[in-house]
Image (cartoon, grey):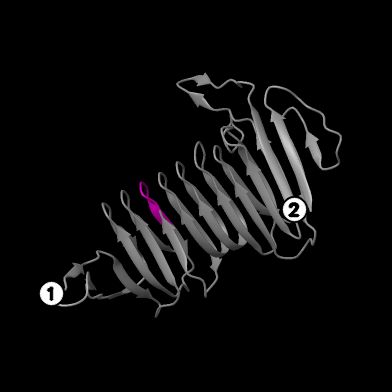
Amino acid sequence: MKTIKITIVIAAVMLINTSLWAQTAEKQQLTVPLSQPGKPYKLDVGLVDGSITVTGYEGKDIIIEIQDKDKDHKGRVRTHDGMHALSTGGRADIQAEENNNKVTIQGEAGKTTNLVLKIPQNDVTLKLGTVNDGDIVAGNIGGELEITNVNGGIKLTGISGSVVANTVNGNVVVTFRSIDTKAAMAFTTLNGNVDVTFPGTLKADVKLKSDRGDIFTDFDVVAEQHKPTVTQKNGGKGAMYSLKIEDWVYGKINGGGPQMMMKNMNGNIYIRRAK
């Protein structure tokens, strides 16, 4: 098991003598080798404050870059009304641990950290989560993805496999290259759009709900009727019953398959067929 702890001082350039660690005035970079390169692996990244960007590449190691918190995930300096952000000299503490092809990366609470990762393209079980001050962006990845945000959006492109994605304040946008035909998936947000593009060969049982928005699709969906749910509150003589009518939309795409659940409150739902 390899455990590596990184402390970044944003306003200064540090020099650390380790073959895994490289730093320039522009970026701070850490390379985490896998115990079994080329094999399926697990990656769990958790932040409290900050953004996460992950891209699959043709390499065997996980490469972690930590960006200045005053820059966005594309490396551009944050601006507002013609003004540019200045570094406050804060620190970002990151700990990375690798054990038998399972990698865990964690950031310190209260420190805004923008992580940019490059990961091998072989099959991955990927779990990404953040809470404040950032979006989660991922692309060119194959495997099983579980993505959680609270105050930020989720954008996934070029995905092969399955996705469960949930945020509270932000859009959920996913584009699949191919899907795991046996996996159930879910895409939810409270305030934002759910916008998912699937291959035209998608077979799914869909369960959809938008409280204050509309649902759009260019797939042929065969709608299903569901009876109201009746629940007995107490047993015996004079038992009371609860009648619950759900306003979910149920249907089948291309004859049906694993369940695809999509839900939001304020926003629209889009189920797109890839062109």
In the image, residue 269 lies at what x, y percent? 35, 57
Q: Is residue 134 above or below residue 236?
A: above
Residue at the extreme left of the image, as rendered? 238
| Residue under pointer 1 | 238
| Residue under pointer 2 | 98
Name the foreground residue: 56 vs 12. Answer: 12
Name the foreground residue: 231 vs 67. Answer: 231
Q: Is residue 242 above or below residue 26?
A: below
Q: In this rendering, would 28 be left or right of 211?
A: right
In the image, residue 83 lies at what x, y percent? 50, 19
Residue drawn at x 55%, y 40% is 48
Chain part drawn in magenta: 189-195
Residue drawn at x 21%, y 67% is 245
Residue 274 appears in the picture as rendered: no
Label 1 environment density (alpha carbons within 10 Å; few <14, some 14–19, many ≥20): few
**Dominant SS in magenta:** loop
- Tell me the kind of residue under disc 2: Glu
In the image, residue 59 lies at what x, y percent? 76, 55
Residue drawn at x 50%, y 42% is 131
Front label number (1 vs 2):
1
Name the foreground residue: 202 vs 240. Answer: 240
- Tell me the kind of residue under disc 1: Gly
